[in-house]
Image (cartoon, rainbow, N blue to C red):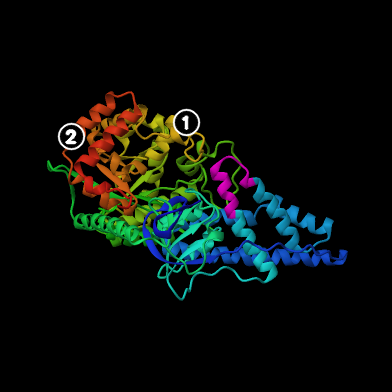
Amino acid sequence: MADSGRSGEKIFQGIPVSPGVCRGRILIVGRPQDEIPKIHIEADEVGCQVQRLEQALIDTRHEINEVQKQVSKALGAEEASIFDAHLLVLDDPTFMDEVNRYISQERVTAEYAFQHVADKYIRTLSGIEDEYLRERAADMRDVTSRILNNLTGADHLDLRHLKDSAIIVSHDLSPSVTAHLDRTKVLGFATDIGSKTSHTAILARSMQLPAIVGLQNASRELVTGQYALLDGYNGLVITNPSDQTLFEYGQLARRQVSIEEKLQEVRDKPAVALDGTRIIVSANIEQPADSESVKASGSEGVGLFRTEYLFINRETLPTEDEQVEAYRSVAAALKPQPVIIRTLDLGGDKFLAHLKVPNEMNPFLGWRAIRFCLVEKDIFCAQIRAILRASAEGNVKMMYPMISGLDELKKANALVEQCKNELRRKGQPFDENIDIGAMIEVPSAVLAADGLAKHVKFFSIGTNDLIQYSLAVDRLNEKIAHLYEPTHPGIVRLLKMTVDAGHRAGIWVGVCGEMAGDPVFTPLLLGMGVDELSMAPANVGRVKFLIRRMKMSEARELADFALESDSSTDILARCDTYVRKIAPGLFEDSRPG
């Protein structure tokens, strides 16, 4: 939506999805797919059309796999997993059978049949109320465009080699196009459609490109060559910005630079509160290449290595030796800092492509994580042996996901002892005293924490799942997402119970969920006695900055208030007020002026 501004400037309001401000010339790209003409064929040509479609699917799969590999290398395995949804479209037998049936019954070309059926699916997904499912229509549009381009010989939109710097404006940018943006020339981008949960938005944040979606008709109202300012903090595109607007945004840019400079000052300093209390601040990673970002962030090792990303997006299981190399490379790169490797958390929405897994009504409550591993013992033991072999580096720890009770923990520990014996017989070195921990992610684990703590060396609280399971809230469901409350009094008490149980048994307790990386919750968690916080490397600087301005006595007062409060809103407000008081520079206003 456009509004008139100062001195002829025009303002388009959208949805901010990736922070930052840029200015430059606009480049309009990405015209909608042209309508495919309906061309009838003879009966004996049907087979040829079906073959053309099959070849287009093969070519498209190859392209998507290549994009996925490049994204994994550049941005990490988690971002690359976005393209799993695209591959699923190609593997959907119902969808492809309908296309083949339409070719045969209507006797039309493969491209016309494919576009006809795909458009029907896209319209259905786009009309669903659930925002997450609506965004899957964007995945189908991306795959549809690629397949049609391969059928018709049309060129793909390619923004990898731009001549000049530009702000990209498009009706939509598919994830595969976004992943290939030339970051030396693309200043930022804006689209007519999309939401904060779209894969394109996720990639923009990973690439640290200012981005806006939901601008409605901007791609039709704006013109290539126009000078504009894109504000990724507030969701604005401003054409012909006035001198006053540029001045105000210049001030905003200076404030943001000032914040980054402050964060750089503490990067290599320990996270020590004003009273001398030392807190460990670690990083979460998905693959070996992420060790570089761990070092650059100033974090103290790895608090969570999500190993499932070594297993998915491939046709075969990684060998034990492959796993050893992956784990050992991280441990060696980060010595002497600790590296905590989580065993497989497959299941829910992450399964091996070649594994036959039955459909489940509630996969996140089903056969996943430690439950999967205790059944698939060959897979689990190969990973345990690999972690143990990597532990010869001297700084490796291991932890199990989604432990719900003592029986699971004892079975997992017994398998570790079995694997240790196998390695001893083979003469393969490993750390005999490797620390083993358990993730606390379900309410039953909290209630059983006193018993669990006797059999591990540490707890790591996965707040994402603990909150979701405790409050019965699917945080991807927009109708109830507001009920996902980290400061819910019940959650606060579960966290405190876990910390106290760990400390009674003489073990340390960390947090590796999203709460750990949000500075607003840092004093609350530390006030309850949490010993370690592990987060995305990008969040380490802000959390360390805040810790170094905290008094633990005040943090404990905040925690006491939270434990006595019956209102999640009051707890959140108290947390917010406190962090803004002790570190106002960390929460500079992102508005211009």
x and y percent of residue 368 in the render? 50, 41
Report the residue marked by disc 1.
472
Sequence-wise, the earlier of marks 1 and 2 is: 1
Report the residue marked by disc 2.
554
Left or right for 144, reference 307:
right
Q: Which residue type does callout 1 highlight? A: Ala
Left or right for 356, reference 415:
right
- Could you tell me which residue is drawn at 74 percent across and 56 percent down? 99
Q: Residues within 10 Å of mark 1 (few under 14, many from 20)?
A: few
x and y percent of residue 113 in the render? 75, 58
- Could you tell me which residue is drawn at 47 percent across and 36 percent down? 481
Classify 500 as above or below 154.
above
* Residue sticking out furthest to the front: 7
Task: Please tell me which residue lies in front, 128 or 56.
Answer: 128
x and y percent of residue 299 in the render? 26, 54
Span of residues in magenta? 125-139
Q: Residues within 10 Å of mark 2 (few under 14, many from 20)?
A: some
